[in-house]
Each structure stands twice: as C-alpha cells, then as structure tokens.
Amino acid sequence: MKHIDVNDTIDNASFTPFHWKVLFWCTLIIIFDGYDLVIYGVVLPILMDQWSLNPYVAGLLGSSALFGMMFGAMGFGMLSDKLGRKKTILMCVVLFSLTTVLNGLAANPWQFGILRFIAGLGIGGVMPNVVSLMSEYSPKKNRSTLVALMFSGYAVGGMMSAGLGIWIVPNYGWEIMFYLAAAPLLLLPLMIKYLPESVAFLMAQNRQEEARVLLQKVAPERQISGDDKLVVPPVKEQKAPVLELLRGGRALSTLMFWTAFFCCLLMVYALGSWLPKLMSMAGYALGSSLMSLMVLNIGAIVGAVGGGWLADRFSLRSVLVTFFMLASASLVLLGYPHPMWLLYSLMAVAGATTIGSQILLYAYVAQFYPASIRSTALGWASGIGRNGAIVGPMLGGTLLALALPHQMNFLVLAIPGAIATLAIALVGRRTGASQPAAEAGAATQG
C-alpha cells in the first residue's frame, strides 16, 4: 500500500480522454449559459419598440437577470461546498434553462423582469462552480489555457445568440430565441451520467472509492490500486470561509479582485446590452447591429484562448493588466467615426479584452486561492462583481437617455478599464499553489 497525494496527482497528470470529457461538458454548459445571458441584448431593440420601453426601463430589465446572478453566484458558490459541484451545477442548469424558456411567454415587462431574475440565479450560480470543477481537474502546466478555453464557451453562446437572432428575430419573433433555451434540458440525462463530481468534495466526504475511480481516469499512468490510500494536504478547519478570503495576507488582493470583477463586468454587460441599440441609433440595420454583437464575442474567444495561452507562459497578472489597458483604449476609439473594417476590428479588440478579461479573471481567482475556499472565492468575486454587471445596463440606459455625444458614451465606459488595470496591478503575487502550507501552519508566510 502506498499513499497517493490527490493534488499532486492531478497537477502532474498527462492530458487524457477524461480531461477532454470534463472540458467538453463544462464548455457546453458555459455555452448554454452565455446564450441565455446574451439573448437580452439581441432582443432589446425589438422589445423597446414592441413594449414602448424608455432607456431607463430597458436598462432595469437588462439588469434583472444580473441581480439574480449576483445572489446566485454567492449562494450557489457556497452551497456547492456542501452539496458538491455536480449537483449544484445540474440544479443551476435546470433553473436557468426552464425559466428562460418561460421568458418567451412573458406578456409584459414585469413578467419578463421577474423571470429574468430567476434565470439569473441559475446563470450566476453555474459559473463559479464550472470554473472550479475545470480548474480542479486541469493539469497545472496548462490550467490557465484549459479554464480560458472552457470559459470561451460563454462567447460561443453569445455568438450563437447573435447569429440566430439575425435570422430568427426579424422573421419569427423574439419569443423563439427563448424557446431554444430548452436544449440543455434535453441533454440533462447525459450530464448526469458523464459530468464528474469534484475529487476534493469526495475526499472531504470520505468517499475514497469514488475518488479513486476518478483519479485512475485522471492519471492512469500512476496505476492506483484499491489498496492505495488517497491523501490531501491538511487544511485548517474554516468555520467562516468568507472571512478566510481576507486572512493569511489575502485581504488587499481579495478587495482588488472584487474591484476588478466589478469594473470588468460593468464593461461587459453595458456593451452586451446596448451595443446593438447604439449601432441601430447610429443608422445601421438590425442585422448589422446584431453583427456588432457577434464580432464582440468572436474577439472574446480570441482574447480568452490567447490570453490563457499567454498566461501559461508569462503570468495571468501581467496579461490582465495589459488586457485592461487595451480595453480602455479600444472603447475610447470606438466613440469616433471609422471605416467599417476598423470599427469591427476595434469591437473585436474590445471583446477580447473585456469578455476575455472576465474569463481570465475567473482563472486567476481559481488559482490564487487554496482548494478549500476556492469555490467560495469564485462565488464572492463573481457575486460582488455582479453589482458592476447590474450597473452596466442601467448606466447604458442612463447615457442614452441623457443624449450625450456618441464619443462620451464610450469614454465613460472606458473609465472602469483604467480602474481595473490598477486593481490587478495591486494583487499579490502568491497563488493557491503556495498557500496550503500556510493554511496548515507548516510554513507561515506574511
């Protein structure tokens, strides 16, 4: 009999078919998540005309799902530490899919807003848990790339929403876009069968046999037998996991993560909700306006995957600082007239460095904190950041209602990028890989 260090086994595993399976299902869930969230920006121009919405009300409707996401991210993030990642993820998928389908039946703004809030609970809850699961199973050498690749599914979902909207909304009405959200419910039996549970959760529940089966798939070359004992580095029992985010020299970094999440999500959801409408007001047809949303999400995929690749070779910290600087610059430039090719190029850069940065932020938080509080850290960073997501659509509506010059709208949206640049620059350099020892008191560091 030998003792097998679970974390070391996963960190140093070779990439196997099991990793592909985890990547596939986590990415697919994020695709559905992204589709359900971006859908509002696609139907917004139609809803404003059909229900005679002013910009303030339209902004509030756009924020209703984001209010739900704030509570969902924090609540389900902590719940998964008790129920497990898999159960929590499946609960969230059912919640956001079912209520998004029902959204297509909404007869007025009140019904629409309430259903969007409930859907937001599931959309916000699934994100930190899927990121945590993917991060846990990824080999250390390419963890940033895999998490970023998985989370680029958000942009793929956004592209699907915009692409289908170009064809469906003018011909068949906005309601069909919501009915298509039933797809995850059809795949639920397969998710139940193939989505793995967190090994860390299984070990915490003393379910060694189940953990051993999964670990054999993660690292078949280790030839783990039934006689081997699985062990994880000891961690100090935490009766208040949220307070642990502020202990051990993490207080400033945690506050800076929350600030960066707030600013980044403000930019992402202001653009996602209002970019098609801004283009429409500038005189572009509905199809061209929705194309801008698609270009934004194409850029997001390039930014997420490219940023993850760069982070594995340099550091997430330096990549994010650079991305946020580029985000501010591209948003400022978008406020001025340009040829269409340059306009779309700037939109792609904005997507790469706003949505792409959001994805990289999740990866950074997942690596910064130890496994025992990782899901809580992701949930709270995402949940507090959701305040920025809530402010984004409302800010966009306010700017439109004020009828400011076109360039002023984008200049205001660029300011959070500058703040996020400073916040990430102030994050400490220590990451979760170096923290377990400190957590155990074996090698206390300041």
Image: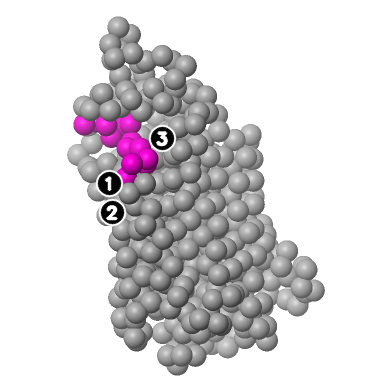
Give the quarter of the figure containing the N terminus: top left
Mark 3: amino acid? Glu
Indicate the quadrant where residue 64 lies.
bottom left
Residue 376 seen in render: no
Marks 1/3: CA–CA distance? 16 Å
Residue that numbered label 1 is attached to: 87
**Disc 2 from disc 1: Cα separation:** 6 Å
Farthest right residue in view: 339
Q: Main secondary structure of the magenta part?
A: helix
Instruction: Report helix, strand or loop for mark 1.
Output: helix
Q: Locate residue 206 relative to residue 318 in the image: left or right.
A: left
Determine the residue positioned at 49% across, 22% down: 12
In screen coordinates, is 256 left or right of 190? right
* Residue 7 drawn above or below residue 308: above
Residue 91: numbered disc: 2
Q: Image point 51% across, 74% down: which residue? A: 41
* Residue placed under numbered mark 3 in the picture: 136
Coloration of the structure image: one colour
Magenta-tinted stretch: 192-205
Task: State the image coordinates of residue 66 (x, y, percent, origin top left).
Answer: 39, 67
